[in-house]
Image (cartoon, grey):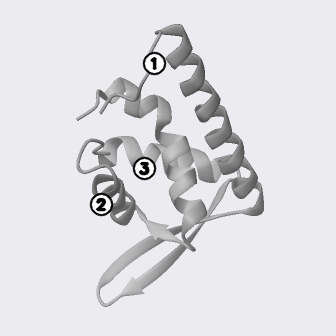
């Protein structure tokens, strides 16, 4: 599992990328999808996820829809057109950052 420092610095990028690949997702679904895709190496806590989702909403990158499922209320998050552009921008920025760090740290091959 990776440190919370690394996850915190990449959480917006992770969330934006996931939402760009789906129509909509709710919070718990996001945490589970990240765990699944990373074989449990990245585990996002609710305490980290929801402030990020609220910030993305405040910035106009996501919208929310509240759906009643039986007696439960589920809040779904969807990217806005502005959010779709931001997702691409953040992923490209992070990819460049990875390349820079590989160069800076003199990493010649992928580490698993």
Marks 2,1: beta carbons within 8 A = no
- Residue 33's x, y, as percent? 35, 61
- Residue 16's x, y, as percent? 57, 52
The residue pinned by badge 2 equals: 32
Which sits earlier in the primary sequence, circle 3 or circle 1? Answer: 3
- Rendered view: 6 above or below 56: above
Left or right position of 103 against 112 = right
Marks 3,1: beta carbons within 8 A = no
- Residue 45's x, y, as percent? 29, 45
Mark 2 is surrounded, within 10 Å at the Cα level, by few (under 14), some (14 to 19) or many (20 or more) other residues, namely some
The residue pinned by badge 1 equals: 108
| Residue at 54 percent of width and 70 percent of height | 22
Quadrant of the snapshot with the C terminus: top left
| Residue at 37 percent of width and 77 percent of height | 73
In what element is the residue under mark 3?
A: helix
Q: CA distance from mark 2 to mark 1?
A: 32 Å
- Rendered view: 94 above or below 107: below
- Residue 78's x, y, as percent? 59, 67
| Residue at 59 percent of width and 33 percent of height | 94
| Residue at 40 percent of width and 74 percent of height | 74
Q: Residue furthest front?
A: 108
- Rendered view: 18 above or below 6: below
Left or right position of 10 against 40 = right
In the depicted view, which residue is nearer to us: 83 or 50? Answer: 83
Which sits earlier in the primary sequence, circle 2 or circle 1? Answer: 2
The residue pinned by badge 3 equals: 50
Q: Residue furthest bottom?
A: 70
Mark 1 is surrounded, within 10 Å at the Cα level, by few (under 14), some (14 to 19) or many (20 or more) other residues, namely few
């Amino acid at each position: 599992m990776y440190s919370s420092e690394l996850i915190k610095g990449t959480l917006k990028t992770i969330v934006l990328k996931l939402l760009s690949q789906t129509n909509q997702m709710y919070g718990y679904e996001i945490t589970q999808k990240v765990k699944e895709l990373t074989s449990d190496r990245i585990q996002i806590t609710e305490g980290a996820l929801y402030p990020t989702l609220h910030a993305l909403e405040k910035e106009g990158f996501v919208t929310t829809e509240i759906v009643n499922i039986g007696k439960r209320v589920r809040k779904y998050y969807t990217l806005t057109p502005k959010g779709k552009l931001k997702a691409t921008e953040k992923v490209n920025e992070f990819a460049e950052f990875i390349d820079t760090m590989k160069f800076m740290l003199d990493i010649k091959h992928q580490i698993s």
